[in-house]
């Protein structure tokens, strides 16, 4: 990989990290709704959207564990949307993802 | 919008070392990433838009044709698959490479993308170097397409002077449109490569060949030859409908299908059924002479165990198998009793209790 591309990727990675607090805040709100059983269909779609984006970006930008965690959670959310219900495993998955995001922000 | 907007030879960007790319993703970080990766691969002319609607507007307003599309699947309102379908409906973009770049790795999405006309499929997270390679491959495909277009253009100019023009080589890929399940040769290979990453257990590859393709080619005009290939594709497609499948034409009269959920006897009567469909089409040459299409089917190849160093190995096995059978069939004289055999088989197919049709009866 050329030095020029490496530099650009580093910049994009920083931009991704800078975008994480906002994503994390939304996830915290949605996680709270999940725990209280107040998650609407729109909330679930938003949750899937946020997690999907993290899944797509994190691995490419060097956050493999965060990306894998998001990938597994995305499947669980898709399943929950399809079946019309969500599980405690999924709620734990959201909380775990929030921790991974914090980890990425701290690097 | 149609292809004439840009003129026949208006956009040859790729021939002078650049490629005009349109990337569509609703995430600005991904767009920036794509821009840098693609530029590093040697293609800096990239337009970035964040939705399907914006993409269609960019296409409409662009003074020159785009050479390649990079589409995300998961977008609000119009997703990347719907966008791909709309792009393919624009005549100028019927064969332009479309790379789907997405985190959706399920076969359901992969199938929908290729059915909508995608040429390749890259899953996120992607390796930046691999993505660059995929874009370079798309550039190579465009070069080949332009070479064919130039040849056709030159031959069209001669057509008024020469009654029969053989502008298609027997080995050329023929563009087949409007036949269920048919995708391009390279798209088919990319589809197999993509699925092989997730496992293809339970899927089978099977190849078909028009054994006397050289004779048919020799006696056909270009249009006649193309129509024959499309008709045969239709006959194969119609008879594969009991499975989930994709079919591609590889040139030289060879077709390859990947069939999902095919059971052991899915292929048993297939050769006879295809032969009957073709016979019922009553194909003729331009001069009205009857066209004898001699079909052969190779041994189906199970795709359960891909060799990681050669993920297309089952494809080559399927093709080798049909080519061997076609060669063997060509050594035999054309059957004088063809009609009576077909009728016998037609009767047997009408009566399911009858024993399976012998492949040898049809030369399969």
Image (spheres, coloured by chain):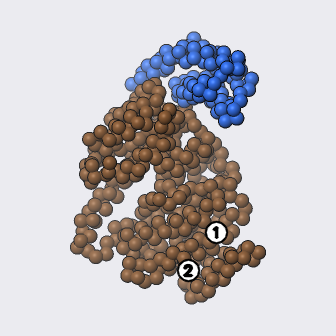
Chain colours: A blue, B brown
Q: Chain ID for label 1?
A: B
The local secondary structure at tag 2 comes to helix
Dot 2 or dot 1, earlier in sequence: 1
Q: Chain ID for label 2?
A: B
Which residue is rendered at x = 35% and y = 34% of the image? B47
Q: Is residue A67 visible?
A: no
Q: Is residue B279 above or below residue B141?
A: below
Within-10-Å neighbours for mark 2: few <14, some 14–19, many 20+:
few
| x, y percent for residue B333 | 55, 84
| x, y percent for residue B358 | 69, 77
Q: Identify the mark at residue B331; answer none if there is no mark.
A: 2
Which residue is rendered at x = 57% and y = 52% of the image? B312
Which residue is rendered at x = 34% and y = 37% of the image? B58
Residue farthest toward the top in the current orientation of the protein:
A106
- In this figure, which residue is indicated by the disc labeled 1? B270
| x, y percent for residue B322 | 58, 67
């Amino acid at each position: 990989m050329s030095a020029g591309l490496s530099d650009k990727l580093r910049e994009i990675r920083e931009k991704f990290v800078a975008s994480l607090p906002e994503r994390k805040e939304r996830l915290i709100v949605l996680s709270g709704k999940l725990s209280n059983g107040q998650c609407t269909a729109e909330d679930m779609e938003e949750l899937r959207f946020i997690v999907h984006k993290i899944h797509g970006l994190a691995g490419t930008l060097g956050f493999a564990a965060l990306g894998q965690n998001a990938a597994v959670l995305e499947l669980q959310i898709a399943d929950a949307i399809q079946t019309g219900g969500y599980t405690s495993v999924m709620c734990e998955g959201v909380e775990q993802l929030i921790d991974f995001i914090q980890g990425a922000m701290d690097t | 919008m149609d292809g004439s907007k840009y003129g026949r030879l208006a956009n040859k960007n790729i021939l002078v070392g650049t490629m005009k790319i349109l990337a569509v993703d609703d995430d600005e970080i991904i767009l920036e990433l794509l821009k840098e990766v693609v530029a590093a691969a040697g293609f800096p002319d990239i337009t970035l838009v964040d939705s399907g609607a914006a993409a269609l507007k960019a296409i409409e307003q662009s003074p020159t044709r785009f050479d390649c599309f990079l589409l995300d699947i998961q977008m609000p309102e119009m997703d990347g698959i719907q966008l791909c379908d709309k792009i393919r409906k624009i005549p100028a973009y019927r064969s332009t490479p479309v790379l789907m770049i997405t985190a959706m790795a399920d076969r359901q999405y992969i199938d929908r993308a290729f059915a909508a006309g995608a040429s390749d499929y890259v899953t996120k997270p992607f390796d930046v170097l691999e993505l660059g390679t995929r874009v370079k491959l798309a550039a190579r495909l465009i070069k080949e397409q332009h070479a064919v277009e130039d040849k056709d253009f030159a031959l069209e100019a001669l057509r008024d002077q020469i009654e029969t023009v053989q502008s298609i080589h027997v080995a050329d890929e023929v563009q087949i449109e409007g036949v269920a399940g048919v995708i391009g040769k390279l798209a088919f290979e990319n589809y197999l490569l993509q699925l092989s990453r997730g496992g293809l257990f339970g899927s089978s590859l099977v190849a078909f060949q028009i054994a006397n393709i050289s004779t048919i080619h020799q006696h056909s005009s270009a249009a006649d030859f193309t129509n024959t290939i499309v008709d045969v594709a239709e006959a194969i497609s119609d008879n594969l409908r009991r499975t989930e499948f994709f079919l591609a034409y590889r040139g030289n009269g060879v077709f390859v299908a990947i069939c999902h959920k095919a059971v052991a006897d899915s292929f048993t009567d297939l050769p006879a059924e295809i032969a009957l469909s073709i016979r019922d089409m009553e194909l003729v040459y331009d001069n009205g002479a009857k066209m004898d299409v001699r079909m052969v089917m190779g041994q189906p190849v199970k795709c359960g165990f891909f060799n990681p160093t050669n993920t297309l190995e089952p494809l080559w096995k399927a093709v080798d198998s049909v080519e061997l059978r076609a060669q063997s069939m060509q050594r035999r004289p054309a059957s004088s009793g063809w009609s009576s055999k077909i009728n016998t088989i037609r009767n047997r197919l009408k009566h399911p209790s009858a024993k399976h049709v012998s492949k040898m009866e049809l030369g399969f």
